[in-house]
Structure formats: structure tokens, C-alpha cells
Image (tube, rainbow, N blue to C red):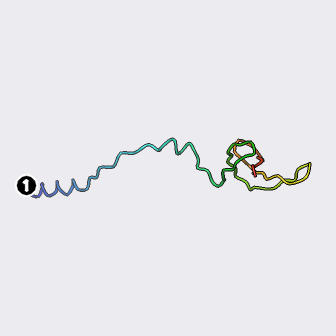
């Protein structure tokens, strides 16, 4: 009888209860984190998020204008407020 009790105790220790499986978070999977980029103050008075470098572009009437490149919303160049 004691042998059965000891065997039963050893067999119960081998059984482990697995933690419940959690579903992956859908919000974090749907949105990819932004890599790089900076917020800039556009000439129109709005903030824009751009991935490319800030460059100076010559103007037809002379002088240079500072623009941010490759911005959100498929904008290639956005004039910046100096």
C-alpha cells in the first residue's frame, strides 16, 4: 500500500499544468513602429513627420529655401518655417 502511495506522489509531480495560451495583441501587430524620422514645423504652420534629410533648395527668384524630404502622406518635400 505504501508503495502505491509513493508511486502516486511521484507520478503527480511529473504532471505540469501548462499556462493558458494568450492571443497576440492585435493593436501592436497591426501598427509597425516608426523607424527614424523627425517632427518639423512646416511653413503652413502644421507639424509634419519626415524620414529624409533636411536640404536647402534654390528658389527661382533667388535665395535658398529649407525643405524636409520624404514626409508622411506621400509628400516628397515640405517647406519648413525658418
Q: How many marks?
A: 1
Percent x, y of residue 30? 56, 42
The residue at the point 73 percent across, 54 percent down is 52
The residue at the point 67 percent across, 45 percent down is 47
- In depth, the one of 20 and 55 nearer the eye is 55
Percent x, y of residue 22? 41, 44
- In depth, the one of 30 and 71 nearer the eye is 71
> Is 57 placed left or right of 16 in the picture?
right
To which quarter of the image does residue 9 belong? bottom left
- In depth, the one of 6 and 19 nearer the eye is 19
> Is 1 placed left or right of 14 in the picture?
left
Q: Residue furthest right?
A: 61
To which quarter of the image does residue 20 belong? top left
Q: To which residue does mark 1 refer?
A: 1
- In depth, the one of 68 and 18 nearer the eye is 68
Circle 1 residues within 10 Å: few <14, some 14–19, many ≥20: few
Percent x, y of residue 75? 75, 44
> Is 29 placed left or right of 63 in the picture?
left
The residue at the point 14 percent across, 58 percent down is 6
Percent x, y of residue 31? 57, 44
Q: Secondary structure at mark 1?
A: loop
Q: Looking at the rendering, in which quadrant would you find the N terminus?
A: bottom left
The residue at the point 75 percent across, 55 percent down is 54
Amino acid at each position: 500500500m505504501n508503495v502505491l502511495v509513493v508511486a502516486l506522489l511521484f507520478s503527480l509531480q511529473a504532471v505540469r499544468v501548462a499556462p493558458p495560451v494568450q492571443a497576440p495583441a492585435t493593436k501592436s501587430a497591426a501598427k509597425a513602429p516608426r523607424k527614424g524620422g523627425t517632427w518639423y514645423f512646416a511653413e503652413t504652420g502644421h507639424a509634419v513627420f519626415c524620414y529624409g534629410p533636411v536640404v536647402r533648395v534654390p528658389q527661382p527668384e533667388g535665395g535658398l529655401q529649407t525643405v524636409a524630404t520624404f514626409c508622411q502622406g506621400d509628400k516628397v518635400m515640405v517647406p519648413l518655417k525658418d
